[in-house]
Image (cartoon, rainbow, N blue to C red):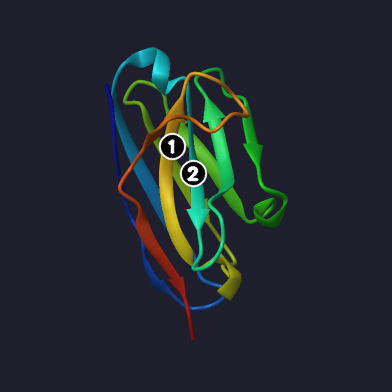
Amino acid sequence: QVQLVESGGGLVQPGGSLRLSCAGSGDISSLYTMGWYRQAPGKVRALVAQITTGGSHDYADSVKGRFTISRDYAKNRIYLEMNNLSLEDTAVYYCNAGPDFLVMGRYWGQGTQVTVSS
């Protein structure tokens, strides 16, 4: 079993920054790839970024250059540094984990709300 616990969401003005974190525990093989997905009201859940234990990473085109994913390999913790946030970034952000890169994992955190509003 895998547990994912997120923190760091909140309310921020357009152009601002937030940092999300996710702590993973459990089956190590299922924590090979950890990442973030987001879901806005009325939209499907979509990839934001993901990173493997080997350091490979992938980003959605909409966040490239603004968001940075990083990983503390010893602690199985990942971070999402979000800069220059826009209204379109408003969503519930979910931590995700699984054994394969570029594939949505089966394990999810509870989600954390990010609201960008003036």
- 77 and 105: which is toward the camera: 105
- 103 and 53: which is toward the camera: 103
Marked residue nearer the N-terminal end (2 or 1): 2
On screen, residue 28 versus residue 3, left or right, reads: right
Q: Amino acid at mark 1?
A: Asn
Q: Are marks 2 and 1 in contact (CB under 8 Å)?
A: yes
Q: Secondary structure at mark 2?
A: strand
Question: Distance of mark 2 from mark 1, alpha carbons?
Answer: 6 Å
Which image quadrant for residue 55?
A: top right
Label 1, on which residue? 96
Q: Position of residue 67 (x, y in %)?
A: 59, 52
Dot 2: few (<14), some (14–19), or many (≥20) neighbours within 10 Å? many
Dot 1: few (<14), some (14–19), or many (≥20) neighbours within 10 Å? many
Q: Quadrant of the N terminus?
A: top left
Label 2, on which residue? 36
On screen, residue 41 versus residue 59, left or right, reads: left
On screen, residue 3 versus residue 98, left or right, reads: left
